[in-house]
Image: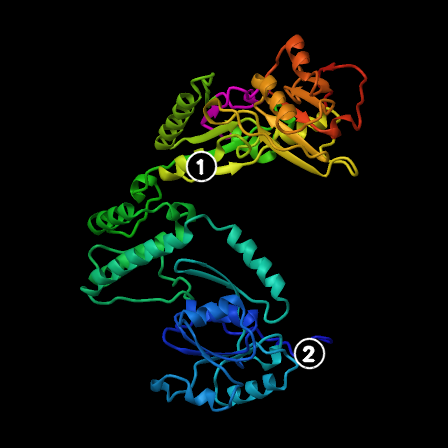
Amino acid sequence: MPGLVGYSTAPGLLASIDCTSQVHLIIGSNSLASARCAKSLEAGAKVILIAPDGEGLPYGLQKRVDDNEIEWIRREFHADDLTCLGREEVNHVVDLVFVTLPVECAQCAYISKICKRLRIPVNVVDAPSLCSFTLLSTHSDGPLQIGVTTSGNGCKLANRIRREIVSTLPEGIGRACHQLGGLRRRLYDNDDSQGGYQDEDDSGEQRSTFNAYVSPDDPESAKTRRIRWLSQICEYWPLAKLCDLTDDAVESLFQDYISTAVDGHVPLTDDAMGIKKSGTIQLVGSGPGHPDLLTTASLKAIQSADLVLADKLVPAPVLDLVPRRARIFIAKKFPGNADNAQQELLEMGLQGLKEGLRVVRLKQGDPYIYGRGAEEYEFFSQHGHRPVVIPGISSALCAPLFCAIPSTHRGVADQVLLCTGTGRKGAAPDPPEYVSTRTVVFLMSLHRLEALVNSLTLEKNYPLDTPCAVIERASCPDQRVVRSTLEFVVHAIAEEGSRPPGLLVVGQACNILCKSEKRWSVEEGFRDF
């Protein structure tokens, strides 16, 4: 094909090579040399770096030299390096050469020519015609390795293809390979005592006799029955099921099939597999309140839940989306009981997981913005269940929008700061200093509004005429906005009353689109989408 000079049209032979104790020569001292060094060390090879002493090494490469992980020969490459620096058992010939010099350097072609003559595998960066091998875009998960190559036709595309492939694999697939490998070795030991063990490598397809009947009266067929049984597991069981296998489950499988599997039949039930059904936990952000503002992922999680543990502030229209078959529990949080109520939710979630349920911890706004989401993540992880966290639209960001307050605006507000008005156990946090171009959003602050405003104006130098707005029940039909200034906002809420949940927005951005000459103004209702 015109324009693709130096690219091979025939695909290369892909193989997994045992590099343990091999000597890999890396010529050059750039960041790519550091990457090649890391790959070789990971494969168990001894690495020798050749580069002049005057060339500075990247941090990672220098650290490996300092830690004596690699040997650095501080000079230019010599031809006899290829036949003098290797292992004694191969007459001191090196096993592999990486050239990371600039491709226009004359040494690249020179080194490549000598390596090819000596049949030493060589890779020259950005020069396919000088390479006898190329590296693949790889993914490693324990014993599992996945490699993708476009045969020199676009490494970036190979990276994307590799990512797409890996994204389809269930979590724990590498551990599953390790578990089945251990089971395979035990089966080998058992079958070897009977003779007739037949091994296959990863490239082998199933034989035509794969599903042939195994008679208990046929001693020759019985010799390989258990290996064929493992092949059935690898071929037919869902990958997600294999990823759930524990050490105890593998032991149960081995013992059960040693004593009962005569015909090689492999049932797919969880009981037969020794797998106890495990529940799932999702920390789901429900957004500011309007059901149309749920993300697609949040909606799917809610509609597939068996047990929903909801914050008390999650509004009814969102809870109405929970299927009737699911159980709903709403947090019993009130002042002075928050910690006990939180612990009750966690314990209920843990019990649901033990029962194999799909548990959804439904949180107002976003789980990680003053939602204790990280605490819950740690709790469930420590009990063996890693949660899936689904973001929600935080009212801290969207409530101002619903009230015609742009949190940032050129020439007026160039930063946004999210703060809490209530610390742990109800303590008053230290509010931020005044910055004229900053919009500050205070969550969980209206119950101590007077103390917060006093702190801002008396201690943090906020001018009394700083515009502000109290936004309550954002995006709900009974949304309310009280626009005022720090001088009068406490009086306004005292007179108008409170309608939680709400937040306080402070800054000049509050006056950009809506200006009022009154001490305060009140706007009722939410205009739907």
- Name the element at disc 1: helix
By what rule are the colours in the image chosen?
Answer: rainbow
Point 51% across, 89% down: residue? 78
- Name the element at disc 2: loop
Q: Position of residue 74 (x, y in %)?
A: 49, 82
Point 73% across, 76% down: residue? 2
Density class for disc 1 (Cα within 10 Å; few <14, some 14-19, many ≥20) is many
Which quarter of the figure is the N terminus placed in?
bottom right
Q: Position of residue 423 (x, y in %)?
A: 50, 27
Q: Position of residue 405 (x, y in %)?
A: 74, 28
Density class for disc 2 (Cα within 10 Å; few <14, some 14-19, many ≥20) is few
Residue type, mark 2 in image: Val
Q: Is residue 394 above or below residue 181?
A: above
Determine which residue is flagged by label 1.
377
Residue 91 sits in quarter: bottom left
Q: Is residue 108 above or below residue 195?
A: below
Is 307 included in the stretch rendered in magenta? yes
Point 46% across, 67% down: residue? 63
Q: Is residue 79 above or below residue 348?
A: below
In the image, the segment drawn in magenta is: 303-324
Is 294 included in the stretch rendered in magenta? no
